[in-house]
Image: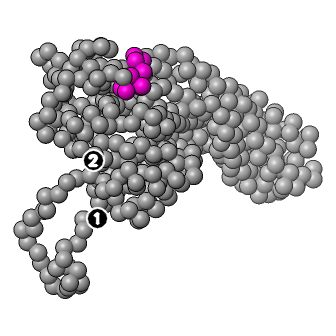
Amino acid sequence: MRLTLDIALTHLLHRKRQSVVSVLGISMGVGFFIAMAALMQGFQRYFVDKTIDVSPHVIMKDEFRVPPRQPVELVYPGGAVRLLNVQPIEERRGIKNAMALAEAIAARPGVAVAPTLVGQVFLRFGSKDVSTTLYGIDPHRERRVTQIERDLIRGRLDSLLTTANGIILGEGLAAKLGVGQGDTVSATSSAGVVLKMKVAGIFRSGITTKDNFESFTLLKKAQVLHDRPNVVNEIRLRLADINQAAPLAIALEARYRYRSESWEETNKNILGIFVIQNGIMYSTVSAILIVAAFGIFNIITTVIHEKERDIAILKSMGFGEGAIRNVFVLEGVVVGIVGTLIGWLLGFGLTELLGAIRFHVEGFVTMERFALHYTFTHYLLAGTFALPSAVFAAWLPARKAAAVNPVDIIRGAA
C-alpha cells in the first residue's frame, strides 16, 4: 500500500500546476457551499424564528374556506341545477359565541388563546392620514400569544389598561404619522366612528409589514370604534409545540368550520421561495464540483497517457489490475481530501467575512447584518459531495489504466 501511495504522490507532484488547479477547484466548491449554506439557512431560520416569535401559530377567522351550499343544491344533490343572481344575506360578521369557543380551545394542553377584533382604521395626526390594521386585544391574553410586550421600545403593554383610549403603534407607523409616546391621534373606522386615542407605546418587531402597518388597542375600544359590540373576528393561538400547528388548524376547522390557518399556511409563499433558494444553492455548488471533477479526470487521463510504459513495466513486475487501478484512484482521493480540507478553511473564512459585514436593509424583515447559521453539518455535507466526485473522476480513467496490456505497450515501444 505504501508503494502505491508513493507512486500516486509522485505523479501528482510531477504535474504540480495541474494538481494545484484540481485542488483549488474542489476547495472553491466546498468553501462556497459552506458559505452559501450558512447564509441561506441563516436567513431562513431568522425569518422562521421572527415569524414564530411575532405571530400566532394558528389563526381562526370569521370566514369559511368553502362557502355554504345553497338550499336548492342540498335538495337536488347532483342535479342539473344552475342558480343565478344569488343575493348574499346581510348578517353580522364575527365568530359566533367566540368567548366560549376560545375557552374550549384553551382547555387543550399546551395551547394559549387570545380573542381579537381586527379591522382597518385611519389615523390622523395634524394633516397626515395613515391607514393601519388595528388589533383589539386583551393584554393579559395577548402576552401569552405574541411577543408584543417584548418588542415594545416605548411604554408598556399594561398601559392600555390605564390610558384612556390608549393605542400602541408600530415604529414605522409612528414615524409616518410623526408621533411619539403621549401624543393624541384621531382614529376613524369604516363605520364612521371617530375616537381620540393617546399613544401609549411604540413597538419594533423587526418585520417591516408589522412595524409599518399594525397597531393595538383594548378589545373593548376596538369594538366601540368599529361599532361592533361584543364581536370577535379572530381567535389567535400559540402552541408549546409549533410542529402541531398544522394538525391543530385542520382539527379546529373540521370541528368549528371557521377557516383556521397555521403559520406555515400563512407564509407558504415565502417558505416556497426557500425551497427554490436551496435548489439554486445545491445546483450552483454541484456545478462547481462537477467542473473540478473534470479537472481531476483530465489530469489523471493525461498521467495515464504519459505513463503507459511505466504501467506496462509495473504490470510485468507483478502489479495486478487492482493495484494499478488503486494508484490512480488514490490520486483522486488525495486531491479530494486536500481540496476538502482547504475548502473547509475557505468556507470558515468566507462565513466569518460575511458575519463581519454590517448594513441596514428594510424589506419584509429589517436586518443589520447577515443572519448566518453555523453548523458542522454543512462541512460534512460539503465533504460528502466533494470526495465522491473526486474519487469517481479518478476511477473512470483508472479503469483504462488497469486494462493496459503490457505486451502491446512494450512491443509498440520497441
Q: How far apart in space, not on screen, are marks 1 and 2 (Cα)?
A: 22 Å
Q: Amino acid at mark 1?
A: Val
The residue sitting at 20% across, 35% down in the picture is: 225
Q: CB of mark 1 within 8 Å of CB of mark 2?
A: no
Q: Position of residue 314 (x, y in %)?
A: 87, 47
**How packed is label 2: few (under 14 Cα within 10 Å), some, or many (20 or more)?**
many
Depicted 12 relative to depicted 399: above or below: above
* Residue that label 1 marks: 66
Q: Position of residue 150 (x, y in %)?
A: 48, 25
Q: Earlier in the sequence, mark 1 or mark 2?
A: 1
Q: Is residue 98 visible?
A: yes
Q: Position of residue 166 (x, y in %)?
A: 30, 24
Depicted 182 relative to depicted 346: above or below: above
The residue sitting at 42% across, 21% down in the picture is: 156
Element at label 1: loop
Q: Is residue 203 visible?
A: no
Question: On residue 392, which mark appears?
Answer: none
**How packed is label 1: few (under 14 Cα within 10 Å), some, or many (20 or more)?**
few
Q: Split into 4 quadrants, where in the image is the N terminus?
A: top right
The residue sitting at 79% across, 57% down in the picture is: 405
The boundaries of the magenta stretch are 153-161
Question: On residue 231, which mark appears?
Answer: 2
